[in-house]
Image (tube, rainbow, N blue to C red):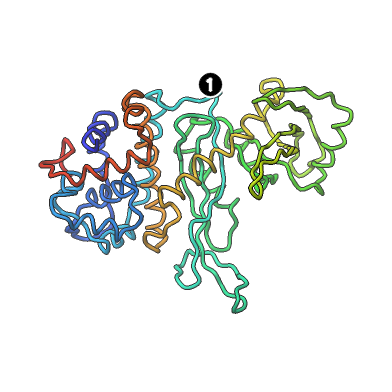
Amino acid sequence: MLARFADYLERTWEFSQVVESLEDSRLYPKVPASAIFLSLFGMFATRLPSLNALEGELRLPRRWEPWVGPRKPSADTLGYALDRSNLKRLRSKLVWINHQMKRKKILRSHSPPYFVAALDGHELFSSFKRCCNKCLMRKIETNKGKAIQYYHRVAVLQIIDARPSLILDIEPVLPGEGEVAAAERLLDRARKLYPRFFDVISADALYLGAPFIKKVKAWGWDVIVVLKQENRDLYQDANGLLAITPSQEFQKDNIAGRRWNLEKLVTWSQLGRPIRAVVEQYQENRRERIAGQWRETVVDHHWRWVTTLSGSLFTGAQVSRWGHARWDIENRGFNDLASHWAMDHCFHHHPTAILACLLILAMAFVLTRVFFERNLKPQFKLRLNLTRMALARLFFDDLAKQWTGSFWAHPP
């Protein structure tokens, strides 16, 4: 299976050329940058949890040579090389892969011809002892009193409401700034790296600020942002209009509800322009097992979004779909990556190394997923009861075989 995966990467993505063009700032390295990248890519593809676990595998003779090459790095060499990674070059490879996804028609929107990206923050890991010069700090109440905790947080831009779910870019939150500032820096770079790649940005209530929305509109995107905070004038303005605005009934997944489309709200004076709001209410019946007994409960849902999308071009149902799809970045992004890909593990505590690992992880995440969905036939996956987790295990088992030569057309 691993040889098939390598052949797929080479035929479809010219992977050996991608690997050979990588570099770092080490002087006279004994282990080439290509071997560093392939070791880390293989670590993520086989779901190994740490650099030490990877080193234990690399030390075994005639095991990783066909994948990595004759010069295999140690955990210390991997950490040293990660500290000196060329982040611009790594990011350019991720961008190239994502653009190829779209050009090859692999990326399919569920709402063609539009593509939507979600913007959200994610905390990676924290420590009371280990820190670096880019760590964020906060005071935490412990059983020994207040203590300073060091942590890292990133802003992530990911395609949603589409298959596959692509991670477009990642930006760290720096000391002394908030998530929105990192997100603005991320989008400023994305407008140059991904021109005309997506049309709408969906975000949570943290991003409901006039400066942010003005910048995003100036960069050529529309936005959908969750509206919370009942004390906001915009929230109260929307409340007042609900009683006098006719609603539309909708049916979705056996759930009936009502939706209001509120046009040209002018209460938000800081924005300097009218804004549109979409309000949705429905009830959901849930069957939960509580204290050993099944109980039927009714849950009320009340959603509000603020959007710059034109009401004449995009219906309230479309705004609702993209607003709810923002959870893709949690369900098909952070949750999957943290639970099964060791995203929240600190492989090496250095700001450059942390971001380099995340960029390589993003490449391994999408390429293994596309290989699973497009290269393996449904009958084959059904016969083996094959899942993406099981695929990682097959990759790992293949490394135990006594392969000769190299998996790549041009050995690294």
At a point 86% along the width and 32% down the height, the residue shown is: 241
Q: How many marks?
A: 1
Residue 142 position in % (x across, y down): 60, 73
The quadrant of the rendering that contains the N terminus is top left
173 relative to 96, above or below: below
- Image spot of residue 399 (x, y percent): 21, 45
In the foreground, 361 or 190: 361
Q: Residue furthest bottom?
A: 144
- What residue appears at the point 50 percent right and 71 percent down from the top-left corner? 128
Label 1 packing within 10 angstroms: few (<14), some (14-19), many (20+):
few
Q: Is residue 3 above or below residue 88?
A: above
- Outermost residue toward the left? 404
Res 272 → quadrant: top right
Q: Is residue 64 left or right of residue 186?
A: left
Image position of 341 (left or right of 152):
left
Q: Provide residue 376's location: percent of width, then percent of height.
A: 32, 27
Residue highlighted by disc 1: 113
Which residue appears at 50% of the width and 35% of the height?
159
Q: Residue furthest front?
A: 292
Q: Nearer the viewer, residue 244 or 377?
A: 377
Amino acid type of disc 1? Pro
- x and y percentages locating residue 385 in the rendered image: 36, 32
Q: In the shown orientation, is residue 162 left or right of residue 46?
A: right
What is the quadrant of residue 54 in the picture? bottom left
Name the quarter where the C terminus is drawn: top left
Please give left or right for residue 217 compared with residue 92 in the image. Answer: right
Q: Secondary structure at mark 1?
A: loop
Viewer-side residue, 254 vs 228: 254
